[in-house]
Every structure is written in C-alpha cells, then in structure tokens.
Image (tube, grey):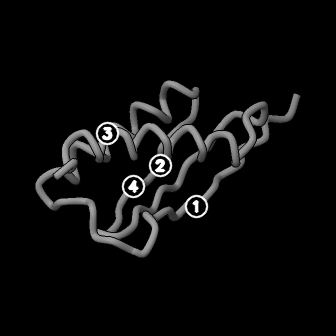
Amino acid sequence: MAYINLLYHIVFRPKNSASVIPIEKEEMLYRYIWGIVKHKNGVLYRIGGMPDHVHILVSIPPKISVSSFMGYLKGKSAMMIFEYHAN
C-alpha cells in the first residue's frame, strides 16, 4: 500500500492587510494553530509570518479538503485574535 504525503504551503492574511498579530501574541497564535492542525489529524511542519500574514507548511489527511480545512483554521484563529485584540 502506497502512502501519499501531500504538503501544502498556505499563506493567509486578514482583509486590507491590517497588522493584527501583535508580536507578544505571536507565539500563542502559532501554538493555537498547531493545536487546530493536530485536532484535524494533520502535521504542522513549519509556521511563521509577519504582523499582517501567516505562513504554514502542513500535511492534512486526504479526506479533508484544503478549503474546508482553511475555513476551519481561519475561523477559529480569527475568533482567538478577536478575543485578545477586540479593542
């Protein structure tokens, strides 16, 4: 049986390229994203970014579409950022 390993380099950013990722919260956001990927049975190989965007290199199971994975990831991470950066 052959094992297929699909890696995706995904970059996502908020609307208008706003700098919404405070430097002091960056590590917490990365850990949160790692937890989401792990929850979806994926593997996070690399994560990084700038205040206005995030890069991830991830492998997700073939049964999950990239668009549904990203929708879930962006939705959950946006709620977490809003919770800490609401003002």
Tag in front: 2 or 4: 4
Q: At 43% across and 75% down in the image, what residue appears? A: 16
Q: Is residue 66 left or right of residue 57?
A: right
| Among the two numbered marks 2 and 1 on one chain, the one whose residue lies closer to the N terminus | 1
> First in sequence: mark 3 or mark 2?
2
Q: Which residue is mark 2?
A: 45
Q: Quadrant of the N terminus?
A: top right
Q: Which mark is residue 9?
A: 1
Q: Are marks 2 and 1 in contact (CB under 8 Å)?
A: no
Q: Position of residue 59 (x, y in %)?
A: 61, 44
Image position of 7 with respect to 51: above or below: above
Element carrying mark 2: strand
Compute the Cα span from label 1 to label 3.
22 Å
SS for tag 3? Answer: helix
| Of callouts 1 and 3, the N-terminal one | 1
Q: CA distance from mark 3 to mark 4?
A: 17 Å
**Relative to the observer, which residue lies in front, 72 or 58?**
72
In the rendered structure, find residue 23 and report the number of the disc placed on it. none
* Alpha carbons under labels 1 and 4: distance apart: 10 Å
Q: Amino acid at mark 1?
A: His
